[in-house]
Amino acid sequence: MGSVKNLEVKKTATATESGVGVFSFTDDYSVFDYGKMPDTIPDKGEALCRMAAYNFEQLKKLGVKSHFRKLVSGNQMEVDLVRVLFPQKGELKQGARNYLVPLEVIYRNSLPEGSSVFKRIDSGQLEWKAFGLKKKPVPGEKLPSPIMDVSTKLEPTDRYLDWEEARQMSCFSKKQIEELKETALKVNDFLNKKAAETGLEHADGKVEFGLGPKNELILVDVCGTLDEDRFLYKGFHVSKQILRDYYKTTPWCAVLEKEKKENPGKGNYTAPPALPEELLKIVSNMYKSVTVAWTGERTWRVPSISDCINDYKSFLWK
């Protein structure tokens, strides 16, 4: 059970053979690593599932291997499974195969308002020069070429790593970590082009990988959806960022941040308020309208992305 999707294991993965599972995408959502929020966004699960399946199918044509097997229904997809081995428990050792690479790889094409990069720079956790930038970035800045970050995946709280730490943690060779970087950039390039065709700007996102039974790198989880990546339409967010932005205006956000600092990893924090009904409808339509435009399949009769943004502007002005 996850905060936004569930996994049913049909066949357990072993060291030498992939397992089989079914992802069920729910209408739940999560922000700030809180967990499941109090309300649901109608049809969000199906929108994410269809968009992710489309991306896997297109990436396969570009030579990017993944764990995607097939779309089972509107909100379910069948996938190959790898093992989850925890480096901090000594479970992941050199020579292992068929396991989840314990990393999240983040690509950034621009630095929109809300990017974690600004918080890290302001707190002294990150030197902007480390990204090869010539000056301190400002919100909305477009980067001359994509930059990449890497963080932990299987720890209570994600933390950023340098690439050598990431390589050692993953029990990868130098060649394998370079392949991982190149594949992440290939995914990013596909998403950039597809977003442009759809009238969107692809700001940033993340991918996760597995190492298969034949020692092959495979894309796992999902990629290029409105939950994994940040998209904008004429400067307005068209992604889960809208939900983050709303909750930042509520007292709950400050309370949650304080509680997480005092009790990191506790996972039993003050419950958030529900979303306003008007915003809930706007966000639901947004997920569906982007999926329709992205996949070319008229799964729902919904307003255009432009109309959704106009509705969102009206909400903000109120």
Image: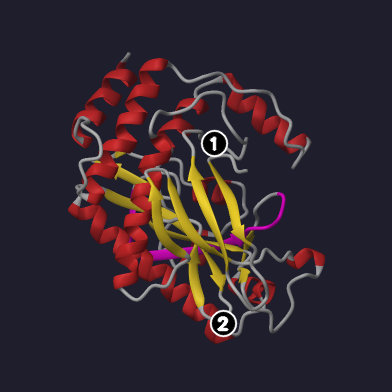
> Can you give x and y, in whole percent of width and height, for residue 203 in the image?
36, 51
Q: Is residue 147 magenta?
A: yes
Neighbor class of circle 2 (other Cα within 10 Å; few <14, some 14-19, many 20+) is some
Name the kind of residue labelled 1 in the image: Ser
The residue lying toward the viewer, choosing from 49 and 17, is 17
> Can you give x and y, in whole percent of width and height, for residue 301 in the image?
20, 31
The chief SS type of the magenta part is: strand
Which residue is label 2 attached to? Answer: 215
- In the rendered view, does 94 fall on the left or right side of 178? right
> Can you give x and y, in whole percent of width and height, for residue 42 in the image?
40, 28
**Separation (CA) of disc 2 from disc 1:** 33 Å
Q: Is residue 16 magenta?
A: no
Q: What is the span of residues highlighted in magenta in the rendered image?
A: 141-156
Residue at disc 1, secondary structure: loop
Neighbor class of circle 1 (other Cα within 10 Å; few <14, some 14-19, many 20+) is some
Query: Split into 4 quadrants, where in the image is the C terminus?
Result: top left
Kindly identify the residue that appears in the image at 73 percent across and 37 percent down: 261
Which residue is label 1 attached to? Answer: 30
